[in-house]
Image (spheres, helix red, strand yellow):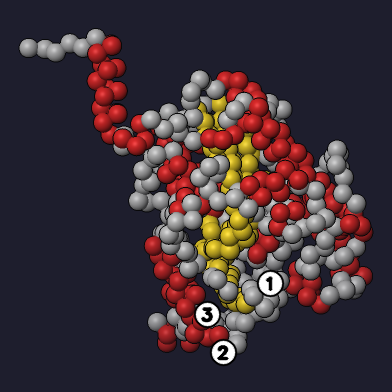
Amino acid sequence: MKLYLTGLSLVIIISALYLSKVPDDKKEENPPNIVFLFTDDHSVPDLGAYGNDKIHTPNIDRLAEEGVLFNRAYVTSSQCSPSRASILTGRYAHEVGASRLHVDRMTDFESIISMLNDKGYYTGSLRKVHQKNIESEFDFSVGRRSTVFVDAFLDELPEDTPFFIWFGTTDPHRPYTNDYEYKHDPNEIYVPDFLPDTGPVREDIANYYNEITRFDTESGEIMKLLEERGLADNTMIIMAGDNGMPFPRAKATLYEDGIQVPLIIKWPGQGQSGVVNDDLISLIDLTPTWLELAGIEVPEEMRGQSLLPLLRSEDYEKREYIFAGRNWHDNWDPMRSVVGERYKLIQNYRPEVGITHTLDRLFSPTWDEFDRLKEEGDLGDERLEYFFAESRPVVEFYDLENDPGEWNNLADDPEYADLIDEYQQALSDWMNETHDFLPSPKEAFPSKRLNNSYDVLDAEEFDSSN
């Protein structure tokens, strides 16, 4: 006997099966919306909410007042597309084959977008995603140069449907246009201690500020749209950066200005407001946060941990370490980093060369200034000679509490030998666990003690240590 089902019967059966799997306390809930405001090349100090009183960012500052500002948020990579691959898959970029710039994740690793789609979310990307095979998964998608704005997405939104918006601005990525509605006075900006304080550098930083303000203005418009359409009270808003500012010793490096980024989360009616959090946070934590918010089970393979308990002031297991890496970005310069509560390890895998340059150099008046000052012998700060060194140490180890600028490398100080060993072991364990293709420190340098030189072991020493 054959069983025939009408279309209506089939719908009823499928609906019943679906509802039977949904917890009773979730069936009547209106699933929260998610809006992700994402800057492009933006280091953590450069928002008013983070204490920079020279930059104009009133909308993001207000977001921080109404949500949680994270003081120690880090990306998994100091490069655009690898960093984004981590957020979109919940895994480190090298785990999904996307550790190099402009490389998409392997398609056998599911993205959060497809998971949200399956849950019934209407997903939209506006502007830069930088992962093409994931960008195609959004229900609504416009390219990075499109003038289409969030109102167009909301106009297409099906009634009573939860949504996810990825607003990936290209600000403050180079090149800068010098065409801004709001312009900062170059005489009224902060010059980081890793840059020369000259007129052209100040102009360059002012334009960087201008681009951040343009992003702030658009973010304000998005928040206003949510208010006007009655969506704000059920929408989590997240603001973050994908990696550090496009200046020397920042983007594409593992120094703080390369991997520490702004992160602000506002969760109306559920999360804390007006709170500053100092815990170590990785942006890979956003993925399980969004999945849990949407009522989706987080796959065990994902590396992050949901921030919802933290946002609710509930018990939360703090991270002991943050891990970050860099591979190919216009050149091959692999390096790995471990950030702890106070100390930081950087492991360089091409120490035989000096600092490598990304293509941002071509659009950077700051780099032009470095070249001019070097030629004239007038860098003004001997530390800036770093940019012209012919080689780098294999190991860098910094006390972030006493040396936030990361200038005093403690790698050769016997007092820190055991601590360095602890951080290298943590890095080795993480690299092995996540199937990193580079040799971990404990395998590459079996002598355990590393000198501040790339000639770590001569051949005889290396043979005897294996």
Disc 3 crowd, CA 10 A, few/some/many (<14, 14-19, 20+): many
Q: Badges 1 and 3: C-beta atoms under 8 Å apart?
A: no
Residue occupying the point 56% across, 90% down? 414
Q: Position of residue 131 (x, y in %)?
A: 55, 40
Whole-angstrom CA distance, mark 2 to mark 3, is 10 Å
Q: Quadrant of the C terminus?
A: bottom left
Residue 149 % position (x, y): 68, 28
Callout 1: few (<14), some (14-19), or many (20+) C-alpha neighbours within 10 Å?
A: some
For the view shown, which residue lies furthest in the left direction? Answer: 1
Secondary element at image label 1? loop
Seen at 49% across and 36% down, the residue is: 32
Q: Is residue 83 visible?
A: no
Name the element at disc 3: helix
Residue plotted at (75% across, 39% down): 217
Q: Earlier in the sequence, mark 2 or mark 1?
A: 1
Nearer the observer, 342 or 125: 342
Tags 2 and 3 in contact by the CB under 8 Å rule? no
Amino acid type, residue under disc 1 in the picture: Pro
Mark 1 vs mark 3: give the one in front.
Answer: 1
Percent of width and height locating residue 377: 90, 73
Q: 259 or 136: nearer the eye?
A: 259
Q: Amino acid at mark 3?
A: Ile
Q: Is residue 273 visible?
A: yes
**According to the image, label 1 marks what residue?**
404
- Label 2 or label 1, whichever lies nearer to me, is 1
Q: CA distance from mark 2 to mark 1?
A: 19 Å
Q: Quadrant of residue 205?
A: bottom right
Residue 420 tag number: 3
Q: Nearer the viewer, residue 317 or 344?
A: 317
Element class at badge 2 = helix
